Amino acid sequence: MKITTWNVNGLRAALSKGIWEWVRQQNPDILCLQEIKVKPEQIPEDIYNLFSQHDVYWNPAERPGYSGVATFTRVSPLAVDYGIALDKFDVEGRVIRMCFPSFTLFNVYFPSGQRSQDRVAYKLEFYSHLLDILDEFQQRGEKVVVCGDFNTAHNEIDLRHPKENKNTSGFLPEERAWIDTYMNHGLVDIYRQLYPDKVEYTWWTYLMNARKNNVGWRLDYFMISDDLVPYVGDVVIHPDVLGSDHCPVTLTIHIEEVTN
């Protein structure tokens, strides 16, 4: 099974830049998009027809043109749930949860803290509340896959200029500590486990030719239950794929082996 995560920074804009051709070529079984900034009724019918090979599940933000996630799947889920049962987060459309026979998939757009200190606090509370939910699943013996834009670079290897950004939200000590906490709760940053020394990024500012010069951050992750690790084939970052300020990341997992 191939699962791709991608913060598209506006789905309509990304589609106008041709991202769906890449999706067709890659043909993931599940595509998790973040920051869609659109409600499904705002997408023209001819564009919506591009999605005909998938079942599509939407969780847009209440605020127009902001946040939101969508999951496209060719594999029918057993159940689908939206949000994390706390209105202060759920009005921003940040989570879709899908249950499959072998694991539960969370498509998550973690908040950014760059607007203000209040948003940093909001972001950290989101990390905490989501982890409580993940703990509940894992304590029941269920496996989880958490993918999306975590809006935090974990370690110095995960951004081009760590010293210059030590006081910038996205690399604050208290934000990075939450990645450690997730990993201490039975979750694995599977890309970094497979590639401990590899330097690749998933986000570049639009300013100062950052992408051309590869001045980026790794903000987009697959965090998986540690007992899923043996079934992972690969995790691939696609830095050359354009259409957003983020690039897609793909997890390949031999799910039939997990089932058996």
Image (cartoon, rainbow, N blue to C red):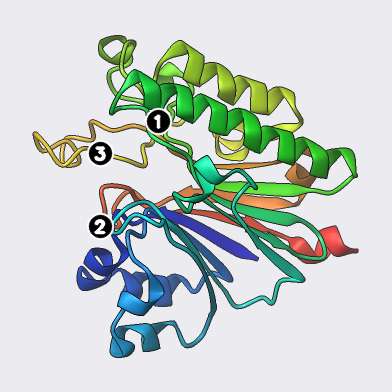
Residue 200 in picture, x, y percent from top left? 38, 36
Q: CA separation, marks 3 and 1?
A: 14 Å
Q: Please state, as top left, top right, bottom left or bottom right, where the C terminus lies in the image.
A: bottom right
Label 3 is placed on what type of residue?
A: Trp
Residue type at numbered disc 2: Leu
Looking at the rendered structure, the kind of residue marked 1 is Val
Camera-side residue: 70 or 24? Answer: 70
**Disc 2 residue crowd, few under 14, some 14–19, many 20+, Cα 10 Å:** some
> Badge 3 is on which residue?
204
Q: CA distance from mark 3 to mark 2?
A: 11 Å
> Residue 43's image quarter?
bottom left
Secondary structure of the residue carrying tag 2 is: loop
The correct choice, above or below, for 10 with respect to 130 in the image is: below
**On the picture, is 236 further left or further right than 169?**
right
Residue drawn at x 20%, y 72% is 16
Q: Which mark is residue 242?
A: 2
Left or right position of 259 against 234:
right
Quadrant placement of the N terminus: bottom right
- Sooner in the amino-acid sequence: mark 2 or mark 1: 1
Mark 2 against mark 1, which lies toward the viewer?
2
